[in-house]
Amino acid sequence: MIENLESSYDCANAGLDLHQLKEELQDLRISTASDSLEDKEKVNRIENQISFIENKCSIHNGQH
């Protein structure tokens, strides 16, 4: 998970960051056996980070 995403985010990093975030999201969904609030918040935060980068950098790949 990226610690701080801000409006000054450098889109030159988008390809690598998106790849890492999507892998982390997939791993979290696979390894998470519980539906705890903490796990849901992690999934939500990663999804939001993916959306932020895709929107800021005009990347339209379809679904996460």
Image (tube, rainbow, N blue to C red):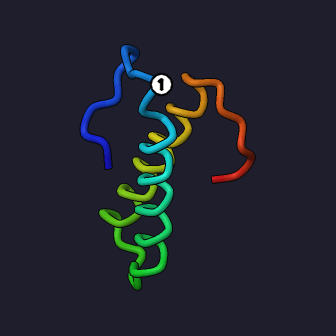
- Figure check: 24 above or below 32: above
Locate residue 30 relative to residue 2 in the image: left or right: right
Instruction: Identify which residue is drawn at 49% across, 45% down.
Output: 18
Q: In the current view of this chain or complex, which residue is farthest to the bottom?
A: 33
Where is residue 50 shown, x and y percent of the image? 51, 42
Instruction: Identify which residue is drawn at 70% across, 52% down.
Output: 63
> In terms of image quadrants, where is residue 49?
top left
Locate residue 24 relative to residue 59 in the image: left or right: left
> Mark 1 is on which residue type?
Cys
- Figure check: 17 above or below 53: below
Where is residue 55 shown, x and y percent of the image? 60, 27
Which residue is nearer to you in this view: 38 or 15?
15
The residue that label 1 is drawn on is 11
| Number of numbered discs visible in the structure rendering | 1
Q: In the current view of this chain or complex, which residue is farthest to the left?
A: 3
Instruction: Identify which residue is drawn at 42% across, 43% down.
Output: 17
> In terms of image quadrants, where is residue 7?
top left
